[in-house]
Amino acid sequence: MSLNNAIQKLEKVGYLDIPTDHVDYISEINRLRKEKNAVILAHYYQRPEIQDIADFVGDSLALAQYAAKTDADMIVFAGVHFMAETAKIINPSKKVVLPDLKAGCSLAESAPADAFQKFKEAHPNHLVVSYVNTSAAIKALTDIVCTSSNAELIINSIPKDQPIIFAPDRNLGDWLNKKTGRNMLLWNGACMVHEAFAIDRILELKKENPDAEIIAHPESQSHLLKVSTYVGSTSGLLNYVKNSPNQKFIVATEAGILHQMQKENPDKILIPAPTADKSCNCSECAFMKLNTLQKLYLCMQYELPDVQIEENLRFKALKSIERMLEISETAQK
Ligand code: 13P
Ligand code: SF4
């Protein structure tokens, strides 16, 4: 079933209109988790209260690895659609529910499958490496999936003389080209949350806080990455702050990460990187923030919306994800 059809089906059921004012979400979520043998997985960009109730909080790679190994009957994915879809592709016998099916991803949407297929056909000697922030249809056209945690490792596992198409993030692709000395052909996609950072405001902040280090997610633009002392995935940024002797950081990624970062480093000063919009001093992913405790409770109670994927497509997409998991696991041993 397509994403739109599934949304329409849910809107007909109207389950989000069910009154829940009387519900104690935390105790009900805890009851349902036990009763249904469910596991709640949350990304670092989720709202603090969702991160706090999750069984596991992680970056895209760790969440996919957890989903591959869990023996829970139901995976409750507090993240965005491509993450829940990846879990379903890897572990199809599980019920995978997402609190809000409209939780998409601007980056995944920047690579429509039909246009990407034409691009791939125009470069037949290229191997395709795609970021996990893509639809199942793109993963089915991909040789190896990667996340920002393992992208460099994946690229370096490919022979130097093999031409590569990298999709969909042009900023991550450009950063990887510089790191690995490759000349990958880049799809022209981007994440609106990471492209929203305003370099002039960040440099002003740095002037006011000369003791702060700028750290950034590689989906950010190259002018920002150039002035950052560390560039890495969400888990990379968390590890960096934990292990650094420095006390102050300007953090250029989605602001949800600050919850976990501050919990791990109560005495450090964490300043979210600002965007051009002066009414807010950070960048938030509106898709990630669609998930609320109320929707988490409802999706566990009604086991809806559940992520469905057509078997033929699932099978094609699985190969590229499995390849990524194999390469990552071999390296982690
Ligand atoms: P990570 O893989 O670093 O968790 O990033 C996911 C994401 O969506 C970044 O915008
Ligand atoms: Fe997608 Fe960007 Fe949101 Fe990550 S932060 S889920 S890449 S829109």
Image (cartoon, helix red, strand yellow):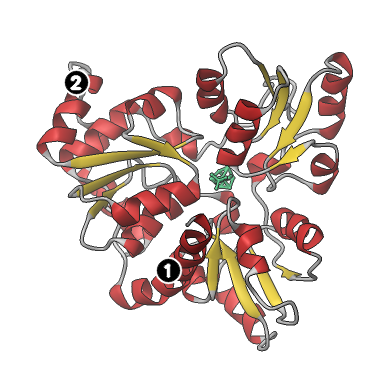
**In this rendering, position of residue 69 left or right of residue 116:** left
| Most distant residue in the left direction | 35
Q: Which mark is residue 273?
A: none
- The residue at 69%/86% (across/down) is 122
- The residue at 42%/68% (across/down) is 322
Up/down of 202 relative to 189, above or below: above
**Mark 2 sits on what residue?**
27
Q: Are marks 1 and 2 in contact (CB under 8 Å)?
A: no
Tell me residue 297's x, y (percent).
24, 31
| Most distant residue in the bottom direction | 124
Residue 276 makes an appearance in the image: no
- Looking at marks 1 and 2 on the same chain, the residue that comes earlier in the sequence is marked by 2
Figure quadrant of residue 157: bottom right
- At label 2, the amino acid type is Ser
Q: Quadrant of the N terminus?
A: bottom left
Residue 191 makes an appearance in the image: yes
- The residue at 35%/56% (across/down) is 87
Tell me residue 285's x, y (percent).
56, 37
Tell me residue 23's x, y (percent).
19, 19
Could you give the CA–CA distance between mark 1 and mark 2, rounded to whole angstroms? 36 Å
Which secondary structure lies at badge 2?
Answer: helix
Q: Of 3 and 191, which appears nearest the observer?
A: 191
Figure quadrant of residue 121: bottom right
Q: Which mark is residue 322?
A: 1
- The residue at 60%/70% (across/down) is 129
